[in-house]
Amino acid sequence: MSSNQNSTVNTNVITSSPDFLSDFASGLVYLVLNALIIPFTLLLGSFTNLLNIVVYHRMGLKDTVSVAFFSLSLSDLVYLLIHISNFIGSVVLFVDELAGEQITETFVRLINPFFPYIMMWYASWPYDISVLTTVFISLQRCLCIALPFRFKSLFTRERTVFVIGFIYVYVTSSYTLIFTTFSLITVVNPQTNASVLFLSYDKDGAIKETVFYWMNRILLQIVAQIAIFLNVLILATSLARSAKFRQNARRNITLDQESTSCSTSDLNSKFSSGPRQNSTDSKSKMITKSQMEHSADTSSALSGKEVQVIKSVTLVAVLFLLTNLPANILFCVNRFVPGFSMGGDYSNTFVAFYTLRTEIEIVNASVNFFVYYHCNTKFRNATRQLVGKLLRRQLDVV
C-alpha cells in the first residue's frame, strides 16, 4: 500500500508542469489580446500613421525633423499592415476549423504552420527600419545640442534624406538575404496522395538564419536600446537646463522691473549719495542686465520650435525604450531559462508573454501621432486644417 502511494506521488511529481500559467490562463491571455486588443490597436495605428504621412506631406517635408518623422510613420505603417495580414490569416484558419472544411485549401495549408513564421520575418523588416530611424532622430537632436552652430550645415535636409534612404536600403538588403534562404515547396503525401506545402531551406539556410537573428534581431536591438537611452539622457538634461534658464530669465526680468519702479525719493537719495555710489549702482545694473540677457539668449536657443522638437523626439525615444524592453527581457529569459520556449516546460508563460510583447510593439508603432500632435504646434494646426477640410467635404456631400 505504501509502495503504491509512493509510486503515485512520484508519478505526479514527474508529470506535473512547472509552468506558471495554466492552459486556460494562457489561452485566455492569447484570446483577449488577439481577438480584442490587438485588432483595435492595429486599426488605430494604421489610421494614425496614415494621418501622419498625409499631414507631414502637406507640410512640405522642408526640414530634417519632418523628413525623419515622415519616414518613421511610413515604416510603422508597413509594420502594422503586415501584422494585419497575419491577423487575417489567423482568422481564416480559425473560421476554417469552426466550419470543419477548408475555405481555401492552399491558403490554409500555407498559414498552418508556415504563414505566421514567414510573416514574423516580414514584420521584423519595417520594425528594424523604425528602430534605426529612432536612433538617428535622437542622435540628430543630441548633436543639435552639442554642436548648435554647426548643426544646420551638418544635418541638411538632403543629408537626412540620404541617411534615411541608406537605412531603408541596408535593412531591406539584409532581409532579402534571409528571405532567400527558405522557400515553400510542394511535397506529395504518399498515404493520402495530396500535395502539402513545406518550408525548405537551402543547405546553409539554418546557419544564415541563426547568424542573422543574432546580428539584426539581438545585437541591433541591444545597441539601439543603449544608444537611445544615452541620447534620452542628454535630451532630458538639455530640457531641464532650458527650463532652468527660462526660470532665471523670468526672475531677472521681474527684479529689473521692480528696480525701475522705485519711487522718486529713492532715486533722489541714490543720486545724493555721490558719484561713487552711482557708479556702483550702475555697474550692478549692468551686471544684472548682462546676466538677464545671457539667460534669455541661452533660453532662446532651446525655446519655441526647438524645445517642441526636442520634447517630441524625447517622448518618441522614451516610448521606444519602454516598448522594446520586453522583447530584450523575453530574449534573455528564453536563452538562459531552459524550457522557456514554445513546447517547453514554460510554454504557456512563453506564449502569453510573447503575445503581450507583440501588442506592446504594436502600441509603440501606433501612438506617435499623439506625441506629434501634443508637442508640435505646426503639426497640430495642419492636422486640424486637414480634418476640418474633410469634415466640410463630407457635409457638402450630405
Image (spheres, grey):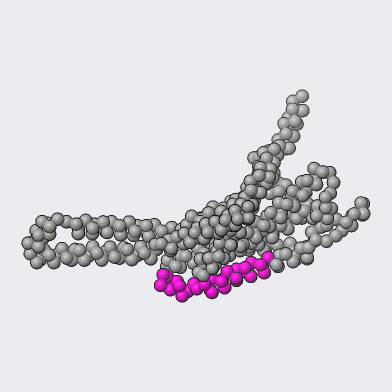
Q: Quadrant of residue 279?
A: bottom left
Residue at the limit of the structure toward the top, as seen here = 1
In the displayed structure, does residue 254 sit left or right of residue 218? left
- Asked whether the viewer can see residue 231, the reply is no
In the displayed structure, does residue 292 sit left or right of residue 221? left
Residue at the spot 43% in from the left edge and 63% down from the top edge: 305
319 part of magenta stretch: no
Residue at the spot 56% in from the left edge and 58% down from the top edge: 389
Image label count: 0
Position of 193 relative to 153 (above/below): above
Residue 61 point in image, percent of width and height? 54, 68
Residue at the spot 74% in from the left edge and 27% down from the top edge: 5
Of residues 309 and 260, the one drawn nearer to the viewer in this rendering: 260
152 part of magenta stretch: yes
Of residues 263 and 190, the one drawn nearer to the viewer in this rendering: 263
- Asked whether the viewer can see residue 269, the reply is yes
Residue 323 point in image, percent of width and height? 57, 53
Position of 237 relative to 37 (above/below): below
Residue 90 point in image, percent of width and height? 74, 50
Residue at the spot 64% in from the left edge and 48% down from the top edge: 40
Position of 325 relative to 209 (above/below): above
Q: Quadrant of residue 240?
A: bottom left
Q: Which residues are magenta?
A: 147-175
Of residues 55 and 171, the one drawn nearer to the viewer in this rendering: 55
In the rendered image, the quadrant that contains the N terminus is: top right
Majority secondary structure of the magenta segment? helix
In the displayed structure, does residue 296 sit left or right of residue 223? left
Residue 355 point in image, percent of width and height? 65, 48
